[in-house]
């Protein structure tokens, strides 16, 4: 160590000045994201804008400039896209792999804090547990366990000692080192991979995917539809002209440019075609989506929640399982020593001489805490506070082993001997732990328990050497947040399953979880017993409290929940939570947590208060539920425009003009969509976004198509011109639009009543007061009566179709797989289902032979039924998981393993059910049940079978 003492003094002021002048400074760490020019061009040069530009050119050629009003929405869409892209660029440029803003540097023998861009080559930096390495360096003094998973993807800890290389972007899991900087700026390892590792990430959002699908489909189908519709409309006018001029041999193309009269007809055909094509694209939906989510981020910021990813709000709305890290989430992270409990000592430990009244367990605890004070975690800080001012003698350490989340213990060697403290299961061997297990269980009912033991020494790798002799215990009490119980209660009410995943003793975790009201917290599992992937996977279906969990197991638990179809959110604040945070669908970190945790999290709780989470979830649900409701308005126009355009190819012309579509777009789509999109809505998000929207939009679309067809029939019967036809269709469509707004506004509130009245009034004023601007033709009494009858019939059809759509049951399919055995699904005439194993292949062969011999297979098939849901089990050759505690099954039963087939719902006799073979197992095709009608949620099946929606 002596040779490093000079180096650890760091650079002098003159040496720093020389390096700054030479440009050897830690700069150029920013991302190489796309330039502002590139982002602007990307948002301008889109297929959506190209289509609208072509349509605008056609309208200009037709000479009807008032029909260019649709470009206002296009400009807004593009503007929002550019603003969001620039915002995303700024955000990503700031969120580098290095989340650390300051670094501790030794200069002139003094420790100072500097910005990262003030570090120069050869600077000596001090790095402790949880710190990220700001620049490539070489260890001068100390030892540490380094996690390089953010760079290499490998989660194994790597021991670093004097002479070892440190890569920028990695972080310390444990230990304390002084290191000399060898690369700065663009020469750093992290800088070299930044260009590949960091970019404006494309979000895998169901809403965005749906919008892109709609626009892409409309873009593909509108080209042939538009050409066919224009040709059909123009040909009709040409045919009328040709009938009036039988001697003319002019072709249709020549006629189109033959004069003002012909061009007037062509212009009318262009406008009707543009009106049809404009309706096929939900222009305002992208604008609405971006606006709603942007407003949500502002609202969350007011609640001290930083959304580092805009579209994670959608994921939050769909979360049905929340995994909590105990420390820093349920508890405040502050700890205090409750007491120490010595054990009788013998042998080597009994010969250690201490002042009178000082117990060996207290001597070991106090000096281990003092030795590891430079890298103190909360446990160490609690011990230092407890022994401050005590009469326990101070001993200089000759070897220090800092705490590691993987080992779950720390230790130090002194002249008096070597001692360790940590989790009993990790410190003691099986026999030694069995002797103290009852005492540990007794103490762990209310506190966190650490064992203190003496060892012969430590190996070069920092492992315990020789015999481990327990000296006693120390109990440490966590401070539970005052708001924890209320927050947990909120999630219970909202149907979100809660799992507590902690590295502490499961008994301690369980007691704290019970205090704050975690359902099923009385049942817990020690993750050290989950030594195979199958055991860990099965434990997910049975428990809600997991203790002694390693960082890798946290990630595997999240993955197991995701395999069951759950949307998982994970909260954490430590280095040991990073892997699980990266894996979760939505990750939440505390601002006071480690740099690594904040770096990978999508949401950061700035005030470090878990009580902010209900507001986050509520905001997400408000945004997505309202978007689903408002999207039905936009998709209605898209669907009826496509259907009506296809009909009008055979029966031209298209009955709407672009200016009339603008009136419908504003009052029936845009205005109510934005108002409803910003309402309060805390209902849980259910089902697919596209399916939910189509179920609301399809009845209205079919009703509008029927109304337009009836208006076209009426126009033909009464010999009405195109302006009269478009007016009739506008009125009928407005009526159906009002019915749709009425339906999606249920139940009515004061705001929704005002909204509905203003929409009706706006449509009436636009149709009656601005007839010339909106190309409204005056209607006779007979025509008005006909339009009224068509509107009433269309509205009646809409309500009937909407009720039928709500009553319709989606047909789902579930897949059940087992290990080496088949699965039989049977049902009784009274309803219910039973899932049983068919046994091994040999057993099934024998059963089939016996069945064929007795000729009873047919009759037995007819008698098959389903037993009570609590009897449903799926067995296999491995050991059974066991009954799931009803309270711990909770809301997870809908999707977890075989419980997906054990829902206690009684199907109607008329519903069909078919069991077929599949490459992935057994496919059971049956009518899906509504979420609200599902039965008991307990009773997860035994075995390692996996059931998921097909």
Image (spheres, rainbow, N blue to C red):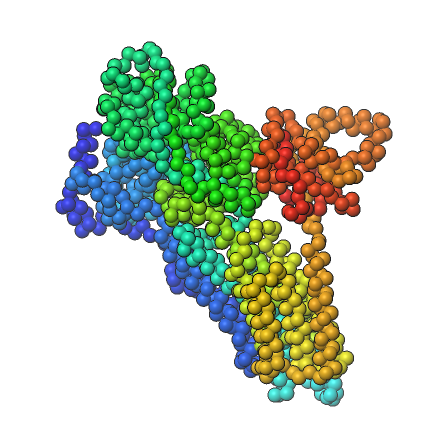
| Spot occupied by residue 897 in the image (x, y as percentages of width and height) | 61, 36
| Spot occupied by residue 756 in the image (x, y as percentages of width and height) | 59, 68
| Spot occupied by residue 892 in the image (x, y as percentages of width and height) | 58, 40
| Spot occupied by residue 58 in the image (x, y as percentages of width and height) | 56, 76
**Is residue 281 visible in this depiction of the protein?**
no
Q: Position of 539 compared to 86: left or right?
A: right
Name the residue at the top extreme.
347
Q: Residue at x 65, y 66 (%)?
A: 739
Residue 492: image quadrant is: top right
Give the answer, above or below, for where 941 lies relative to 11. Answer: above
Give the answer, above or below, for where 604 lies relative to 716. Answer: above
Looking at the rendered structure, the number of numbered marks drawn on it comes to 0
Q: Position of 195 compared to 241: left or right?
A: left
Name the residue at the right extreme.
855
Q: Residue at x 51, y 37 (%)?
A: 518
**Is residue 439 visible in this depiction of the protein?**
yes
Q: Residue at x 19, y 50 (%)?
A: 20
For the N terminus, which image quadrant? top left
Residue 70: image quadrant is: bottom right
Which is nearer the eye, 813 or 313?
313
Q: Residue at x 39, y 31 (%)?
A: 477
Residue 456: image quadrant is: top left
For the C terminus, which image quadrant? top right
């Amino acid at each position: 160590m002596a040779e490093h003492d000079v180096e650890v003094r760091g650079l002098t002021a003159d040496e720093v000045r020389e390096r700054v002048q030479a440009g050897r400074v830690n700069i150029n760490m920013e991302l190489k994201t796309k330039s502002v020019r590139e982002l602007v061009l990307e948002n301008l040069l889109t297929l959506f804008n190209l289509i609208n530009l072509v349509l605008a050119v056609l309208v200009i050629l037709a000479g009807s400039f008032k029909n260019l009003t649709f470009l206002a929405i296009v400009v807004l869409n593009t503007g929002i896209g550019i603003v969001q892209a620039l915002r995303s660029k700024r955000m990503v440029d700031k969120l580098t792999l290095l989340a650390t803003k300051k670094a501790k540097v030794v200069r002139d023998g003094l420790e100072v804090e500097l910005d990262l861009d003030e570090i120069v080559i050869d600077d000596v930096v001090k790095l402790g547990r949880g710190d990220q390495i700001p620049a490539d360096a070489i260890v001068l003094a100390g030892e540490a366990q380094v996690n390089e998973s953010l760079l290499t993807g490998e989660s194994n800890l790597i021991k670093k000692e004097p002479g070892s290389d440190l890569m920028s972007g990695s972080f310390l899991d444990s230990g304390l080192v002084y290191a000399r900087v060898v690369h700065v700026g663009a020469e750093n390892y992290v800088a070299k991979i930044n260009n590949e590792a960091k970019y404006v990430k494309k979000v895998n959002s169901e809403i965005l995917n749906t919008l892109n699908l709609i626009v892409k489909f409309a873009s593909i189908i509108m080209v042939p539809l538009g050409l066919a519709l224009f040709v059909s409309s123009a040909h009709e006018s040409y045919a009328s002209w040709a009938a009036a001029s039988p001697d003319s041999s002019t072709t249709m193309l020549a006629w189109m440019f033959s004069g003002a009269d012909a061009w007037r007809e062509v212009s009318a055909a262009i406008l009707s075609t543009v009106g049809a094509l404009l309706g096929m694209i939900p222009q305002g939906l992208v604008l609405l989506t971006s606006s709603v989510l942007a407003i949500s981020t502002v609202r969350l910021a007011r609640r001290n929640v930083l959304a580092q990813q805009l579209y994670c709000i959608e994921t939050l709305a769909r979360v049905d399982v929340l995994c909590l890290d105990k420390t820093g989430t349920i508890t405040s992270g502050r700890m205090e020593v409750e007491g120490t409990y010595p054990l009788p000592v013998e042998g080597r430990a009994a010969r250690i001489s201490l002042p009178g009244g000082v117990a060996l367990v207290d001597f070991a605890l106090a000096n281990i805490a003092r030795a590891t004070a430079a890298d103190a975690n909360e446990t160490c800080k609690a011990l230092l506070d407890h022994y401050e001012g005590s009469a326990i003698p101070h001993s200089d350490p000759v070897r220090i082993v800092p705490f590691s989340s993987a080992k779950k213990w720390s230790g130090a060697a002194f002249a008096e001997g070597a001692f360790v403290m940590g989790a009993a299961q990790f410190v003691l061997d099986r026999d030694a732990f069995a002797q103290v297990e009852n005492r540990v269980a007794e103490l762990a009912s209310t506190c966190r328990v650490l064992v203190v033991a003496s060892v012969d020494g430590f190996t070069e790798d920092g492992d315990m050497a020789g015999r481990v002799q327990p000296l006693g215990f120390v109990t440490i009490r966590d401070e539970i947040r005052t708001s924890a119980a209320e927050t947990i209660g909120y999630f219970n009410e909202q149907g979100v399953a809660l799992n507590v995943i902690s590295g502490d003793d499961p008994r301690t975790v369980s007691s704290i979880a019970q205090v704050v009201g975690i359902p099923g917290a009385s049942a817990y599992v020690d993750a050290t017993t989950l030594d195979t992937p199958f055991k860990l996977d099965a434990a997910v279906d049975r428990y809600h409290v997991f203790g002694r969990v390693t960082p890798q197991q946290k990630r595997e638990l999240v993955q197991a929940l995701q395999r069951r179809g759950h949307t998982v959110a994970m909260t954490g604040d430590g280095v040991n939570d990073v892997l699980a945070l990266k894996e979760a669908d939505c990750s939440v970190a505390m601002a006071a947590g480690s740099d690594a945790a904040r770096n990978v999290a999508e949401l950061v709780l700035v005030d470090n208060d878990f009580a902010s989470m209900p507001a986050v979830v509520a905001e997400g649900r408000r945004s997505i539920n309202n978007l689903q409701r408002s999207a039905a308005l936009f998709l209605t126009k898209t669907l009826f425009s496509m259907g009506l355009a296809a009909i009008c190819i055979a029966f031209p012309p298209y009955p709407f003009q672009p200016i009339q579509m603008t009136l419908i777009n504003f009052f029936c789509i845009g205005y109510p969509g934005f108002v409803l999109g910003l309402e309060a809505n805390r209902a849980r998000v259910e089902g697919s976004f596209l399916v939910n929207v189509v179920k609301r939009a399809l009845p209205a679309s079919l009703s509008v198509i029927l109304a337009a067809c009836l208006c076209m029939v009426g126009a033909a019967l009464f010999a009405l011109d195109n302006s009269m036809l478009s007016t009739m269709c506008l009125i009928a469509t407005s009526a159906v639009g009002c019915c749709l707004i009425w339906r999606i506004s249920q139940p009515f509130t004061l705001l929704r009543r005002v909204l509905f009245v203003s929409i009706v009034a706006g449509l009436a004023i636009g149709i009656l007061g601005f007839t010339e601007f909106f190309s409204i033709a005056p209607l006779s009494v007979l025509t008005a009566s006909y339009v009224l009858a068509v509107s009433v019939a269309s509205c009646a059809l809409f309500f009937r179709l909407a009720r039928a759509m709500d009553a319709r049951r989606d047909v789902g399919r579930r897949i059940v797989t087992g290990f080496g055995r088949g699965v039989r699904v049977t049902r009784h005439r009274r309803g219910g289902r039973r899932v049983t194993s068919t046994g091994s292949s040999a057993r099934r062969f024998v059963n089939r032979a016996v069945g064929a011999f007795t000729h009873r297979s047919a009759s037995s098939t007819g008698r098959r039924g389903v037993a009570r849901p609590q009897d449903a089990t799926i067995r296999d050759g491995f050991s059974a998981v066991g009954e799931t505690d009803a309270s711990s099954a909770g809301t997870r039963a809908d999707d977890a393993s075989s419980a997906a087939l054990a829902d206690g719902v009684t199907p109607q006799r008329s519903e069909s059910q078919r069991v077929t073979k599949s490459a992935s197992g057994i496919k059971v095709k049956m009518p899906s049940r509504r979420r609200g009608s599902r039965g008991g949620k307990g009773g997860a099946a035994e075995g390692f079978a996996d059931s998921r929606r097909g």
